[in-house]
Amino acid sequence: MLAVVFAVSLIGVRYEHPQVHFTVDLPKEWVVADPKDDPTGVILQRATDDRLTICSIHATQVGDMALADYVQAIAAASQGERGYTRLASGPVTLAGTVGHRLRFTQFIDEKGEFTKTVEERIVIIGGVGYVVRVEGFTPWFKKRSSDVAHLFDTFAVPAAPTAKAEPAPGQHAQPCPFNL
């Protein structure tokens, strides 16, 4: 079965979460890293990188939580890590909805000689908070920039709006009034 998934992934496929939380088109050579059903998300990886570049997507019920509060909670998990350096932060559109982008680096070794680059895109749709996180050893992450863009561009939520004139309850037109 895994060989079939691998073979199909060489031409690119659409991944649909088993509980229909979201879909994403896998770039060529990307596969599901752990085929076990996870009710909250999935981890994807480049088959040829042996986990040097991965994408995790998670959906969490957040109710009417404001996007700014959700972003702050997500950001807090990384900001205390060794070697954390913020590269970018600000509004972004994900799945046709105003969200927030965080990009940073962190050390991946004890001596602080190697870093990984992480890009997170965060959005709340229908009371569900979605975090699409792509990370990888910094040189590999840069080489995979088209894959990274493809993952963010094709992420979709069933019945997600294509344009948003008015923010939904719990969301704000300016997604985050602060820079993380």
Image: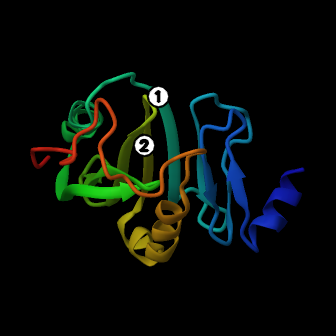
Helix, strand or loop at label 1? It is: strand
Q: Residue at x 73, y 34 (%)?
A: 36
Residue 155 quadrant = bottom right
- Report the residue that reaches farthest toward the left: 178
- Left/right placement of residue 78 relative to residue 55 reads left
Residue 74 lies left or right of residue 136; in this view the side is: left
Q: Residue at x 20, y 56 (%)?
A: 90
Task: Please provide percent x and percent y for residue 102.
Answer: 26, 52
Q: Which mark is residue 60?
A: 1
The residue lying toward the viewer, choosing from 21 and 81, is 21
Q: Position of residue 173 (x, y in %)?
A: 21, 47
Mark 1 crowd level (few <14, some 14–19, many ≥20, 10 Å Cα): some
User: In this rendering, is residue 172 above or below 121?
Assistant: above
**Residue wearing tag 2:** 131
Colour scheme: rainbow
- In screen coordinates, is 98 left or right of 76? right
Which label is found at residue 109?
Answer: none
Q: In this orientation, which residue lies closer to the viewer: 109 or 41?
A: 41
Task: Give percent across and percent down for residue 80.
Answer: 19, 36
41, above or below 132, in the image: above
Q: Residues within 10 Å of mark 2 (few under 14, many from 20)?
A: many
Q: Disc 2 or 1, which lies upstream in sequence?
A: 1
Q: Is residue 41 visible?
A: yes
What's the CA distance linking mark 2 and mark 1? 9 Å
Query: Type of residue at label 2?
Result: Val
Q: Is residue 107 left or right of residue 161?
A: left
Q: Amino acid at mark 1?
A: Thr
Q: Are marks 2 and 1 in contact (CB under 8 Å)?
A: yes
Percent x, y for residue 5?
A: 82, 57
